[in-house]
Amino acid sequence: MKLSDLGENRVVAELTRALALGADVRVGAGDDCAVIGRPRDRHWQLLKTDAVIEGVHFLPDEDPRRIGWKALGRAVSDIAAMGGEPRHALITIAAPPTTSFARVRGIYAGLRKSARRFGVSIVGGETARSPGPLFLNVALTGTVERARCILRSGGRPGDALYVTGRLGGSLAGRHLDFTPRLAEARWLTANFSLHAMMDLSDGLAADLPRLAAASRCAFTLEESALPRTAGCTVAQAVTDGEDYELLFALAPRQATALEAAWKQRFPRLALTRIGALRPKSEIRNLKSEIPDVFDHFRQR
Amino acid sequence: MKLSDLGENRVVAELTRALALGADVRVGAGDDCAVIGRPRDRHWQLLKTDAVIEGVHFLPDEDPRRIGWKALGRAVSDIAAMGGEPRHALITIAAPPTTSFARVRGIYAGLRKSARRFGVSIVGGETARSPGPLFLNVALTGTVERARCILRSGGRPGDALYVTGRLGGSLAGRHLDFTPRLAEARWLTANFSLHAMMDLSDGLAADLPRLAAASRCAFTLEESALPRTAGCTVAQAVTDGEDYELLFALAPRQATALEAAWKQRFPRLALTRIGALRPKSEIRNLKSEIPDVFDHFRQR
């Protein structure tokens, strides 16, 4: 059995099943970040690790500053999706010995720019030799007020589902220049009682079923409501991936107030109600509504 | 200018120069771990990230359980070298889609075994597709009592230098099965006032000059005293690397008590006084005493 036969979801689920966890682990593998702390602590710590790889997440001739910006931004997006703020980053770069120093310095320039922008301290930089492609791993810590920590698993039947921004077409360029929705997520958790949240990295078609499954819900999706990038089909909007937008669920009675306040606060960023969570018993398999999902181990 | 022209020390130094650090960063890049916390906190947090790569740190046909054991053990060794205890690990595996699931599960079996042994919770497991070799990154947190946190930079002229275990020949097998010196380091920091400590990963010839430089000292090394693995020459003992033993400095007046207590507590593990730190002004360049150092970007 090969990884490509199983697919990413099952590989991760199998590997992380029944891991022994310490008493201070609130959330282990399976959410955007791990959550560490005692049940009554005022702040919890968030932990995330994420890699970008030449030939998978960026092309060899890409501007190295954009590679660095993307690598840290992806992890910041995950911290944001928990409602938290990023703090400390550790960088691993594995590169062939023939790599020019200018390229690696360019990657660091992008990392530094992102770190400055989002309040991150880069506190470690490991290097190693790669016999293959350039490999860039970011480990990132964050903190979140316990009351503002939003998991994937808190969604309830009836919740309204929202996404920020527009979906699809990211590979045409935005995937290297996106802005993690940190300010938006912090504002959301300060002003509304979100039930569940995650960031969209693999595309709505892969990520929405994950949020729904974690919340033990089914979902409905209004295809016509999907906020598509100009020129994108519905299929592209839900499967292209690398949107780095927020997907969240909240009680429908908060919807009107949310939409009005959002327009005031973020007039230039779309916020769209795209569907609802439903009781799991009501609809057995809504996943078939949307096209085949992106999978790291299954080639597109 | 290529990475192989500059060498690892200069690449890391250049990349991590003048990074903007938050007020809670006690130690950034350059030691075995980053150290996070306020100056008077009773406990500080330790952060480490480290990668092992197929074809560099292990061969493609290696027992996957040994790969997992090694990957987490390397990071545990770095936490130990700060005097701390490991806590939470996040794993990134990038593998070709054709990789068998059994292989990845074997790697996780090794990771889990190490995690159980050293009290680590594995709280996150990312997977990605690799177009090249298998790549395994471990991000690890730890905690250390402030008073027991030992940096590389605290060594003083006159300090006695010690190493645990025997050096050299690790690539014949031990590099995949080593036991991080966690118990030994905790015992040392509980009972003695160490001035500086690090773990030996690149070989004494590379690592001792790093400790001495961080402590703004020169050093003397008694070649005849070096605890060599049976069959190893002095050159092999100091350049083979991957020993994962402790190197530390303490006041010479503690030497007798240390050696006696060590024999009682760890009768089966060698502890050897190998030299001393010296005033930097006294001897300009003692590095030439030992052979050319291991460097990740310079082929051996």
Image (spheres, coloured by chain):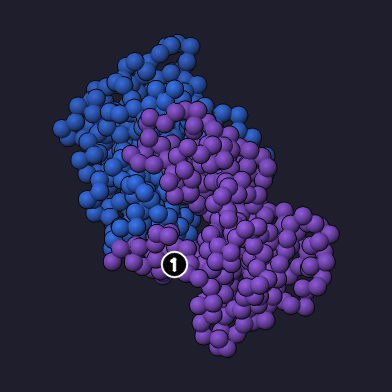
Chain colours: A blue, B purple
Apparent side of residue A159 relative to residue B119 in the rendered image (left or right): left
Residue A97, quarter of the rendered image? bottom left
| Nearer to the camera, B207 or A175 | B207
Q: Residue at the spot x=25%, y=48% of the render?
A: A60
Q: Is residue A278 above or below residue A13?
A: above
| Nearer to the camera, A84 or A138 | A138
Residue A267, quarter of the rendered image? top left
Callout 1 crowding tier (Cα within 10 Å): few <14, some 14–19, many ≥20: some
**Could you tell me residue B149's position as x and y percent?**
65, 64
**For mark 1, what is the residue?**
B9
Query: Which chain does the numbered disc 1 sit on?
Result: B
| Nearer to the camera, B270 or A127 | B270
Q: Residue at the spot x=25%, y=34% of the render?
A: A168
Tell me the kind of residue under disc 1: Asn
Q: Residue at the spot x=38%, y=30% of the render?
A: B98
Apparent side of residue B72 relative to residue B227 in the rendered image (left or right): left
Q: Residue at the spot x=58%, y=53% of the render?
A: B170
| Nearer to the camera, A283 or A4 | A4
**Could you tell me residue B271's position as x and y percent?**
72, 64
Q: Secondary structure at mark 1?
A: helix
